[in-house]
Image: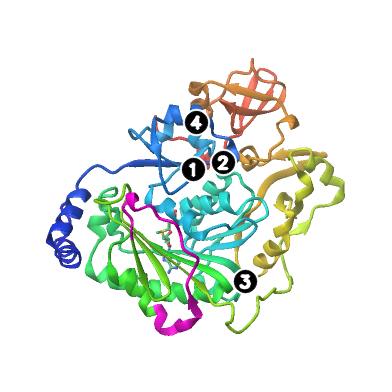
């Protein structure tokens, strides 16, 4: 499908005829392919070679361009969470949030989790990322991606932004990667052209206004607000920020400056106290993207609220099971073990109170790392534990399979019993954990979750 006529008219008017035409031409060309490596999983140079990396994404330490698009579905490293397929421009948000180690970050519009996994890597083990997705089905995909990333510092919630706004001044950083008209995806995703209309632009803009109000309530004084879209549309970018400044006024102050190399082709600007960054595909190597950052003045009234934990579904794990749970994780001194019904989870100790508070206020659908259930004093591990970067591989026998067997495993087919130890085994491919398998005599039971299974032939 051709680019929508009204869109072409508008960009030629906004950017001038020559630059508008250059943008439209770039939108008809091939899209660059890029990934972001998972630093918690020690990806190494061999992986970059296998992926055919052609060079680094200059604005993101773990970002790489690939020479051609591989079939990610058939790469076990992809399923092991060794990298996330993320277009390059979006990776810029990591640069804008600055040093967020140990911080509490809200990613308010988070599915499928590209930016969540980036924030999780940046927040480190002492930090917490609350990744919210309003749409339940998309929230499940988000939770799957969070499990695979394996950092144990993310809580996935699924609610309207208002409920998180009600936490009032609770987050150090709030990121709004807003639902938008998706013009920046016209090259990568032809469906975006079909869905585009001027009516939809208006709908998106008013939705963005409502989301930003809640984001601002959730942000603590002195905290950082990040706003991004994948559209070129001024009404949804600068326009949304201008409308926000109308009601937030001088509560919005400048964020520290972010270094941007002129050679990257990013167009830097200002809207009041917001610093803005535009990615045009004819200038920068990535899809169309808009990002803006500002802070909430520390002088604004009200202090950070710490709601009392009243009713939480999480209970401390009974001491009778904690020795067995500890056996499965490295660095357990920093973890707290909790029970939800008969399932056990581990959370970073420093954020355990926060996850408790969160679970009293909003529906938490996943948090920390799911460890599994205890049967007769032994842990029956949850599939998520295999992906966790803190899994202690001394806890069970490890079987390293080749790529072909790994794909059989990921299709939930039965693996040969000969190479397995009796009982539970961890299945790895090139050292990257994929999941568990149980050998019972001459048979093996594939414990890979059905929801993640590869369906393609
Ligand atoms: N941040 C994600 C990433 O990097 O993978 C992409 C987010 S996407 C641009 C915007 C998300 O906002 C969608 O998942 C959509 O379901 C969600 N959304 C739609 N309407 C919303 C609303 N009214 N409030 C909050 N989120 C909304």
Residue bearing mark 3: 170
Q: Position of residue 262 (x, y in %)?
A: 34, 53
Q: Earlier in the sequence, mark 4 or mark 2?
A: 2
Disc on res. 132: none
- Image marks 1 and 2: residues in contact by CB distance under 8 Å: yes
Left or right: 346 in relation to 154: right
Badge 2: how crowded within 10 Å, few (<14), some, or many (20+)?
some
Q: Are marks 3 and 4 in contact (CB under 8 Å)?
A: no
* Marked residue nearer the N-terminal end (3 or 4): 4
Identify the residue position indicated by label 1 in the image: 62
Q: Secondary structure at mark 2?
A: helix
Q: Is mark 4 within 8 Å of ligand 1?
A: no
Q: Let me know if residue 257 is in the magenta part.
A: yes
SS for callout 1: loop
- Is 251 inside the magenta-drawn segment? yes
Residue 21, image quadrant: bottom left
Front label number (3 vs 1): 1
Residue 411 appears in the rendering:
no
Q: Is residue 432 above or below residue 183?
A: above
Q: How far apart are labels 4 and 1 at the CA level? A: 19 Å
Query: Going by the image, does 295 lie left or right of 325?
Result: left
Front residue (pair 339, 150): 150
Q: Residue extending furthest right?
A: 320
- How many labels sit on residues? 4
Residue 311 rendering spot, x and y as whole percentages: 73, 69
The residue where tag 4 is placed is: 76
- Decide which of 299, 418 is in the foreground and name it: 299
Identify the residue under disc 2. Answer: 39
Residue at image point 28% right, 62% down: 232
Residue that appears at 75% across and 54% down? 338
Question: Between disc 2 and disc 3, whose residue precedes?
Answer: 2
């Amino acid at each position: 499908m051709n680019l929508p006529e009204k869109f072409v008219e508008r960009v030629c008017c906004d950017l001038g005829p020559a630059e508008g035409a250059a943008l439209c031409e770039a939108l008809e060309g091939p899209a660059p392919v890029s990934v972001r490596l998972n630093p918690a999983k020690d990806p190494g140079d061999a992986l970059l070679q296998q992926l055919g990396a052609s060079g680094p994404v200059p604005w993101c330490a773990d970002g790489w361009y690939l020479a051609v698009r591989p079939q990610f579905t058939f790469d076990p490293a992809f399923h092991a969470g060794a990298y996330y397929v993320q277009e390059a421009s979006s990776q810029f948000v990591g640069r804008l949030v600055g040093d967020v180690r140990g911080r509490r970050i809200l990613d308010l519009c988070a599915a499928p989790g590209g930016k969540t996994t980036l924030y999780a890597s940046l927040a480190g083990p002492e930090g917490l990322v609350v990744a919210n997705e309003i749409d339940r089905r998309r929230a499940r995909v988000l939770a799957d991606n969070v499990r695979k990333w394996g950092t144990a510092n993310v809580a996935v919630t699924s609610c309207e932004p208002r409920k998180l706004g009600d936490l009032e001044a609770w987050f150090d950083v709030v990121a709004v990667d807003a639902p938008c008209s998706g013009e920046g995806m016209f090259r990568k995703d032809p469906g975006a052209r079909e869905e585009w209309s001027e009516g939809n632009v208006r709908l998106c803009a008013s939705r963005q206004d409502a989301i930003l109000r809640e984001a601002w309530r959730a942000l603590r004084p002195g905290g950082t607000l990040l706003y991004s879209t994948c559209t070129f549309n001024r009404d949804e970018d600068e326009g949304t920020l201008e409308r926000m400044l109308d009601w937030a006024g001088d509560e919005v102050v400048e964020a520290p400056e972010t270094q941007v190399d002129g050679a990257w082709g990013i167009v830097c600007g200002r809207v009041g106290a917001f610093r803005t960054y535009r990615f045009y595909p004819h200038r920068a190597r990535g899809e169309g993207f808009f990002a803006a950052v500002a802070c909430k003045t520390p002088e604004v009234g009200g202090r950070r609220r710490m709601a009392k934990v009243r009713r939480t579904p999480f209970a401390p794990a009974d001491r009778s099971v904690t020795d067995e749970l500890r056996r499965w994780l490295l660095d357990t001194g920093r973890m707290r073990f909790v029970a939800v019904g008969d399932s056990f989870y581990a959370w970073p100790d420093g954020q355990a109170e926060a996850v408790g508070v969160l679970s009293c206020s909003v529906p938490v659908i996943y948090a920390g790392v799911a460890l599994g259930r205890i049967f007769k004093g032994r842990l029956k591990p949850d599939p998520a534990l295999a992906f966790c970067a803190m899994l202690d591989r001394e806890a069970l026998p490890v079987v390293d399979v080749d790529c072909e067997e790994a794909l059989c495993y990921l299709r939930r087919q039965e693996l040969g019993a000969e190479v397995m130890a009796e009982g539970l085994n961890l299945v790895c491919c090139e050292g990257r954990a994929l999941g568990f398998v149980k050998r019972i005599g001459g048979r093996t039971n594939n414990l890979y979750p059905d929801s993640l299974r590869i369906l393609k032939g």
